[in-house]
Amino acid sequence: MSTEVKKGALGFAQDSPAERVVNGIIAENPILVLLIGMCPTLAVTTSATNGITMGLATTFVLALSNAVISAIRKIVPNTVRIPAFIVVIASFVTLVQLIMQGYLPALYDALGVYIPLIVVNCIIFGRAESYASKHGIVPAFFDGIGMGLGFTCTITVLGFLREFIGAGTAFGIQIIGEGTIIPGPVGEFVAQYQPISIFIQQAGAFFVLAALIAIMNKVKFNMAQKGEDVSKFGEGGDCCKLPEDEKKEDDK
């Protein structure tokens, strides 16, 4: 007698390693879908290097803290659950902090206070409370990897776009300089590149983040129009509703 396999993100078997990773990168991307972890997202993404470093540090903490919290979930009394989670998370953050101070001092200085503040990053504590404390070690570990990679990919792209538009560089390497001629489709002169410095300032983070969220919402809307299941994308939203769905709600 066969049992029906529950489907998770994008049709993968629910709580399988692949489903957890895809879920974190796409369906429940912490930044573009769940809109959490905004402080480091907006503050440290002045360059792609800062973005990928912060993302990988957060992924390390997420994956290992999820696994440990899952392992101890049945022996930790409910009354001290939250302090226990914080101790586990803080231990891994301290490890990351010491490694970066010892081997990547320049990046550690660039990221500043946001490395120790990983302890209170709502992505990490949110996954510990909502997922790791309720599931086995393997799915919890891969859930941490998926959410971490989703966070890493997003802030790396965000940092790359801000850095490239604002300074003409990528990962610290000069790609295009001020005054560089931008050729047209047939080799004709179009314009000269001028860095838009606002993009490497605070306001630029909001501009680029808004554009990325709009792209994600457009993808979700197109999937909904094609009849594909978008219920696994966070908690859904108005961006995923088709006109006929809105009409049905109005009729109610």
Image (cartoon, rainbow, N blue to C red):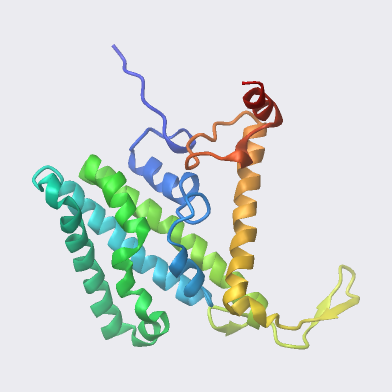
Q: Residue at x 36, y 20 (%)?
A: 4
Task: Locate residue 93 relative to residue 76 in the image: left or right.
Answer: right
Of residue 225 and residue 207, the one placed in the foreground of this image is 207
Which quarter of the figure is the N terminus placed in? Answer: top left
Q: Position of residue 227 (x, y in %)?
A: 62, 28
List the single residue furthest toward the top.
1
Q: Quadrant of residue 243?
A: top right
Q: Is residue 100 above or below residue 143?
A: below
Q: Position of residue 148 (x, y in %)?
A: 38, 58
Which quarter of the figure is the C terminus placed in? Answer: top right
Q: Residue at x 77, y 82 (%)?
A: 193
Task: Locate residue 104 relative to residue 204 in the image: left or right.
Answer: left
Residue 168 seen in this snapshot: no
Residue 49 seen in this snapshot: yes
Task: Locate residue 4 relative to residue 162 in the image: left or right.
Answer: left
Q: Quadrant of residue 247?
A: top right
Q: Residue at x 25, y 53 (%)?
A: 66
